[in-house]
Amino acid sequence: MHRDLVRGRLRPEARIDLHGMTLAVAKAELTGFILSAWASGRRLVLVITGKGKGDHGPLPTRAGALRHEVPHWLHMAPVAAVVMQVVPAHVRHGGAGAYYVYLRRPGRG
């Protein structure tokens, strides 16, 4: 199954697009989405972060802040209990700007 996942052969059952959200809003949306998907019995979801673009304003910021933070958030409470695996998505599902999130079966989180 992992091989099919990283080759883009599996179809995500739900998706969330975090483009344009602030870190605080994105974290709240992601948490609600993951817990709702798990409660609905979904196993594979797609989280789209975007690749980020270099903001060269007066204060230094990390390019692709969402892309960098989302994997960390998925390994923190309360969603860590329901997340089994997080891997970069296949290019057909967003490549470096997205992640597959494989969820545990309900009742085992």
Image: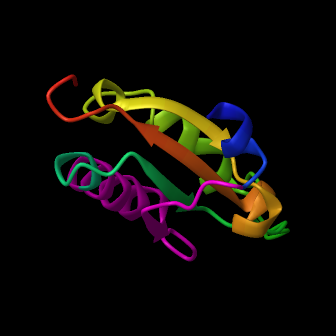
Quick one: which residue is furthest to the bottom in this view? 20
- The answer to whether residue 27 is magenta is yes
Q: Is residue 23 toward the left or the right of residue 82 in the image?
A: right
Q: Position of residue 87 (x, y in %)?
A: 66, 39
Q: How is the image coloured?
A: rainbow
Q: Position of residue 11 (x, y in %)?
A: 56, 61
Which portion, as a residue range, is magenta? 9-36
- The answer to whether residue 19 is magenta is yes
Q: Is residue 51 visible?
A: no
Q: Is residue 19 above or below residue 78?
A: below
Q: Position of residue 84 (x, y in %)?
A: 44, 27
Q: Is residue 55 visible?
A: yes
Q: 41 or 60, which lies in front?
A: 41
Q: Is residue 12 above or below residue 108?
A: below
Q: Is residue 75 toward the left or the right of residue 81 in the image?
A: right
Quadrant in which the C terminus is drawn: top left
Q: Position of residue 42 (x, y in %)?
A: 32, 51
Q: Quadrant of residue 70?
A: top right
Q: Is residue 34 toward the left or the right of residue 55 in the image?
A: left
Q: 44 or 66, which lies in front?
A: 44
Count every numbered label the image shows and give the total.
Answer: 0
Quadrant in which the N terminus is drawn: top right
Q: At 58% across and 43% down in the image, what residue appears? A: 69
Q: At 38% across and 27% down in the image, what residue appears? A: 76
Q: At 24% across and 47% down in the image, what residue appears? A: 35
Q: At 61% across and 54% down in the image, what residue appears? A: 10
